[in-house]
Image (cartoon, helix red, strand yellow):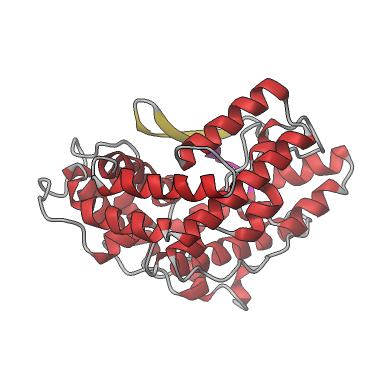
């Protein structure tokens, strides 16, 4: 891929596809038998999105966005590379954004609202937009919103391909993700990571492993104690709810019963703000992170081996030589 691919990325992700496309990964992937050793620092940071991982992720997302911008320019469309916010320094900063909570709560209203524009949170293929997709930047969304229906369709076709051109990656019998396999986003991800499946494995496999880890830590006596402490804080703010998950489930039920009304949206935002305040006050994200680190070694051995393959090589260099590279036009 010339000078555009970040150093070490292609070698790293080439081993990741087998490790993460289908979990468990013990059958047919090679790499020796499963190890009983616990995860190292790099594996823990990738699994829990902590430590150096947010900084590295931010760099890679910027490189991806720059590749997308070049591709869109070749297709005749502008694409703004927006600077991501600074990487969070603490678990509280990473898990609780007060501004986002005050503006959109948990994001439920958008999910339940009726069609509110030509894009409507979709990716041009009919699939829901990915949370970390660079195209979700405000400037690009505003640009598409001002286009005619025909122009917006052409823009989204360049960005994410013709409707229906999606790929699915399974991480278990009932778990998986779908993503566009055509267009500038797909092409840029493939160029950066070596191929599109490698991108999906890198981004999504640790998330599904982390769901397993969540199930494990709930068995520790400290877990219900933390949730009780959070619940007591919420009661002090006027919200009777047993857990953060219950708070979201209750709101989903209200949306399903009453629709995306302004009153329900106000209730969502008030709940989300109080939730975030309590989480910060009792340091819930940091204390949960401690539990995750403590129990990470209890993940299935095949997951631990997959994490090792995911972190087997050096991380990408900042921007991979993309910015100002005269060969990228």
Asked whether 261 falls inside the magenta stretch, the response is no
Residue occupying the point 62% across, 65% down: 66
Residue occupying the point 43% across, 59% down: 282
Query: Camera-side residue: 236 or 82?
Result: 236
Residue 75, horizontal then vertical, whole percent: 74, 54
Residue occupying the point 78% across, 56% down: 77
Asked whether the viewer can see residue 121, the reply is no
In the figure, residue 325 lies in which quadrant? bottom right
Total marks in image: 0
Residue 79, horizontal then vertical, whole percent: 73, 59
Residue 37 versus residue 109 in the image, above or below: below
Q: Is residue 63 left or right of residue 196?
A: right
Residue occupying the point 50% across, 68% down: 88
Q: Is residue 123 left or right of residue 89?
A: right
Residue 249 versus residue 227 in the image, above or below: above
Q: Is residue 101 left or right of residue 116?
A: left
Residue 125, horizontal then vertical, whole percent: 65, 34
Query: Camera-side residue: 122 or 163?
Result: 122
Residue 20, horizontal then vertical, whole percent: 32, 43
Query: Camera-side residue: 7 or 128?
Result: 128
Looking at the figure, which quarter contains the C terminus?
bottom right
Q: Magenta region: which residues? A: 179-183
Asked whether the viewer can see residue 206, the reply is yes
Q: Is residue 147 left or right of residue 276?
A: right
């Amino acid at each position: 891929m010339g000078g555009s691919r970040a150093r070490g990325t292609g070698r790293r992700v080439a081993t990741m596809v087998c490790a993460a496309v289908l979990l468990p990964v013990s059958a047919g992937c090679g790499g020796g038998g499963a190890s009983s050793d616990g995860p190292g620092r790099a594996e823990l940071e990738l699994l829990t999105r902590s430590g150096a991982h947010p900084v590295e992720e931010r760099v890679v997302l910027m490189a991806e966005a720059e590749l997308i911008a070049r591709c869109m320019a070749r297709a005749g469309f502008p694409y703004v590379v927006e600077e991501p916010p600074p990487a969070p320094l603490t678990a509280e900063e990473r898990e609780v954004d007060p501004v986002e909570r005050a503006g959109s709560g948990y994001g439920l209203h958008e999910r339940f609202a009726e069609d509110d524009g030509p894009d409507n949170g979709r990716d041009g293929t009919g699939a829901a937009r990915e949370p970390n997709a660079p195209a979700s930047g405000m400037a690009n969304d505003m640009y598409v919103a001002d286009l005619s229906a025909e122009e917006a369709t052409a823009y989204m076709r360049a960005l994410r391909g013709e409707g229906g051109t999606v790929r699915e990656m399974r991480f278990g019998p009932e778990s998986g993700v779908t993503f566009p396999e055509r267009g500038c986003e797909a092409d840029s991800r493939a160029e950066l990571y070596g191929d599109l499946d490698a991108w999906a494995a890198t981004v999504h496999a640790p998330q599904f492993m982390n769901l397993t880890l969540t199930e494990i830590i709930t068995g520790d006596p400290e877990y219900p104690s933390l949730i009780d402490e959070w619940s007591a804080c919420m009661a002090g703010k006027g919200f009777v709810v047993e857990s953060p998950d219950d708070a979201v489930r209750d709101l989903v039920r209200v949306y399903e019963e009453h629709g995306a009304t302004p009153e329900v949206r106000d209730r969502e935002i008030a709940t989300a703000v109080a939730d975030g305040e309590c989480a910060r006050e009792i340091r819930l994200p940091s204390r949960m992170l401690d539990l995750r680190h403590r129990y990470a070694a209890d993940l299935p051995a095949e997951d631990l081996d997959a994490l090792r393959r995911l972190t087997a090589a050096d991380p990408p260099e900042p921007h991979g030589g993309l910015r100002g590279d005269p060969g990228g036009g």
